[in-house]
Amino acid sequence: MAGYDNGGTKWFQVPMDYDIPTESRKKIENGVQYFSMGRIVWFTNLDMRNDHQNLILYKTYNKKRLSNL
């Protein structure tokens, strides 16, 4: 199943002694430290609206083309 991105930055709680070298990936709220890991995509088995869209294929398998890589 494809991943689902609901947009926005994802923040994860980490221990206060966890070293986060990049200030833009760190925030502290109410004495709790959070770390942003950048681009995150959630994988789920829940039914999502994107699951029912047709997948448009634009290439076909070609063993000869793969052997030239």
Image: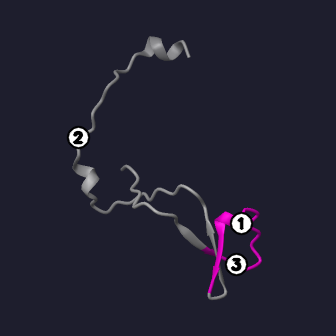
Query: How much space separates mark 3 and mark 2, taking CA atoms?
Result: 43 Å
First in residue order: circle 3 vs circle 2: 3
Q: Which mark is residue 15?
A: 3
Element at badge 3?
Answer: loop
How crowded is the residue under tag 2: few (<14 C-alpha within 10 Å), some, or many (20+)? few
Residue 35, relative to residue 30: is it above or below? above
Element at badge 1?
Answer: helix
Q: Label 1: which residue?
A: 23
Which residues are drawn in magenta? 13-29
First in residue order: circle 1 vs circle 3: 3
Q: Label 2: which residue?
A: 54
Which quadrant of the view contains residue 14?
A: bottom right
First in residue order: circle 2 vs circle 1: 1
Residue 43 percent coordinates (x, y): 42, 57
Which residue is located at x 28 percent, y 52 percent? 50
Q: Which quarter of the rendering shows the C terminus?
A: top right
Query: How much space separates mark 2 and mark 1, taking CA atoms?
Result: 41 Å
Give the amino acid at mark 2: Asn
